[in-house]
Image (cartoon, grey):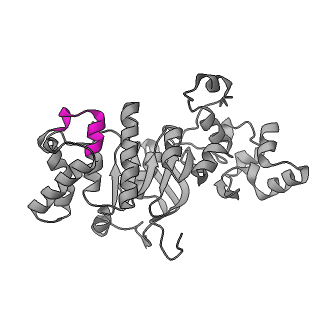
C-alpha cells in the first residue's frame, strides 16, 4: 500500500446516542474506530440491534454523530451541515436493506435511477438518460425495464435497481446495509458477484453490513465484530473468521450453519447464557461481561481497551499486555489459556 495515498475513510471514536422518553438515551454506537482503504471492503457483523446500521447511517451523516470524528478522503466532515455535505453526498452512497421499501412506487425504474443526478444537477436530460440506460445494463437488467414500476419486479431485481441508483452519482464509497438479507439464497450470490465485479472494475470501497458470516468472510478484506454498539474485534477477514480471539466472536462463528451435515454434527457450538443488556442502560465495564464465561470482576468495572494482538485488535482483558506476559511465563498462547480456563 502506498503510504502517500490517503485512506478513503477514517473513523475515530465514533459515538451515536438517540434520545428517548424520560430523558434516557439509546447507546447505539460507542467509541468505534477503524480505517478503510481505497478499493477495500470492511465487513461488519453482529446480532440484530448491535448498532451496525446506525453506524453506517452516522458515517454518511444521515444521523449526526454524538461525538467522534468522520474523516473522508482526508477531510473531517463530522461537523459539516447539509450544504457543506452536498458535494460529498455524490461520493458516498448507500444500498439499503429492504428493496421493497427503498424504491418510490410512483416512479418508473428510469426515474428512480435518474433522480439523484437531477438533485445534483448532473448533465443534460439526454446525458442522464444515457447514464440510466448504461446502468440498467451494468446491473444485469433488460433495456425495456426502464419504463416499468418497482411492483413489477422480484426482490433481487429491485435490489439491482437500488444498486443502479447508488451508482448513478459514480461514488467512491458505498455503505451496503444488509443488501442481501431480504433475498433468496440463489439471488444473494448474484448480488454479491455483482458487487465484487463493480469493485474490481471501478475501485469502490464498501462498508458491508450483514448477518451472514460466511458471506462477509467471502466478500470482505477486513471484518469488524460489533456487540452492543462497541467494536469488540477487528482484523483481516481470514484472521477473524478462522482464528477468532474475542469470546463473542468465537460464539458468533460457532453458531453459523455448515452445509455439510457430518461437519455440522461434529461442530462444537458455544452457547451463550443470559440476555443482551439494554442499550438504554449498558453495563459499566465490558459490554459482553454479563454473558462471558471468562469475565473477571475487573471486566464489570472497566471497559477494556482495543489491544493489538497478532496483527488485529480485540477488546478483551484476556489479551491485555499483562495477561499476555502471564500466558508467556506459563508457556501457553492466549488461545490455549482461554480454552483451558
Q: Residue furthest bottom?
A: 4
Work out whether 300 lies above or below 201: above
Q: Is residue 115 left or right of residue 341?
A: left
Give the camera-side residue of 222 and 106: 222
Give the camera-side residue of 92 and 289: 92
Q: Quadrant of the rendered structure where residue 153 is?
A: top left
Which residue is found at the position 39% from the left and 52% from the top? 175
Residue 276 position within the rendered picture, expressed as x and y whole percent measured from the top left? 58, 35
Work out whether 80 lies above or below 300: below
Q: Is residue 269 magenta?
A: no
Q: Is residue 277 left or right of residue 85?
A: right
Give the camera-side residue of 254 and 17: 254
Q: Give the residues in magenta.
A: 149-161
| SS majority, magenta | helix
Q: Is residue 63 visible?
A: no
Which residue is found at the position 56% from the left and 42% from the top? 281
For the N terminus, the quadrant is bottom right
Give the camera-side residue of 83 and 211: 211
Q: Is residue 40 left or right of residue 182?
A: right
Residue 186 position within the rendered picture, expressed as x and y whole percent measured from the top left? 38, 32
Residue 51 position within the rendered picture, expressed as x and y whole percent measured from the top left? 49, 46
For the C terminus, the quadrant is top right
Residue 105 position within the rendered picture, expressed as x and y whole percent measured from the top left? 17, 39
Amino acid at each position: 500500500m502506498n503510504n502517500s495515498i490517503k485512506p478513503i475513510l477514517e473513523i475515530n471514536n465514533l459515538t451515536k446516542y438517540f434520545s428517548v422518553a424520560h430523558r434516557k438515551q439509546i447507546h447505539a454506537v460507542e467509541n468505534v474506530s477503524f480505517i478503510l482503504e481505497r478499493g477495500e471492503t470492511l465487513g461488519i457483523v453482529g446480532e440484530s440491534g448491535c448498532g451496525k446500521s446506525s453506524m453506517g447511517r452516522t458515517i454518511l451523516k444521515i444521523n449526526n454523530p454524538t461525538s467522534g470524528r468522520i474523516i473522508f478522503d482526508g477531510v473531517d466532515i463530522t461537523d459539516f451541515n447539509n450544504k457543506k455535505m452536498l458535494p460529498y453526498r455524490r461520493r458516498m452512497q448507500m444500498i439499503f436493506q429492504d428493496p421493497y421499501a427503498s424504491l418510490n412506487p410512483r416512479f418508473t425504474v428510469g426515474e428512480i435511477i435518474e433522480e439523484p443526478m437531477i438533485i445534483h444537477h448532473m448533465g443534460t436530460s439526454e446525458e442522464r438518460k444515457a447514464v440510466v440506460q448504461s446502468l440498467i445494463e451494468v446491473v444485469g437488467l433488460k433495456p425495456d425495464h426502464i419504463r416499468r414500476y418497482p411492483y413489477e419486479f422480484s426482490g433481487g431485481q429491485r435490489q439491482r435497481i437500488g444498486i443502479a441508483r447508488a451508482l448513478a452519482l459514480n461514488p467512491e464509497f458505498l455503505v451496503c446495509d444488509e443488501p442481501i438479507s431480504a433475498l433468496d439464497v440463489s439471488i444473494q450470490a448474484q448480488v454479491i458477484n455483482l458487487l465484487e465485479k463493480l469493485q474490481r472494475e471501478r475501485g469502490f470501497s464498501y462498508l458491508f453490513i450483514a448477518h451472514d458470516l460466511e458471506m462477509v468472510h467471502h466478500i470482505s478484506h477486513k471484518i469488524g465484530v460489533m456487540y452492543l454498539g462497541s467494536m469488540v474485534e477487528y482484523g483481516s477477514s481470514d484472521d477473524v473468521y478462522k482464528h477468532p480471539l474475542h469470546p463473542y466472536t468465537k460464539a458468533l462463528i460457532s453458531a453459523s450453519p455448515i452445509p455439510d451435515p457430518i461437519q455440522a454434527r461434529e461442530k462444537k457450538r458455544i452457547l451463550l447464557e443470559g440476555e443482551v443488556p439494554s442499550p438504554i442502560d449498558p453495563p459499566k465495564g465490558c459490554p459482553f461481561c454479563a454473558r462471558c464465561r471468562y469475565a473477571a470482576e475487573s471486566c464489570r468495572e472497566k471497559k477494556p481497551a482495543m489491544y493489538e494482538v497478532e496483527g488485529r485488535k480485540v477488546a478483551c482483558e484476556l489479551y491485555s499486555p499483562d495477561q499476555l506476559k502471564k500466558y508467556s511465563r506459563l508457556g501457553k498462547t492466549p488461545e490455549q489459556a482461554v480454552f483451558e480456563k
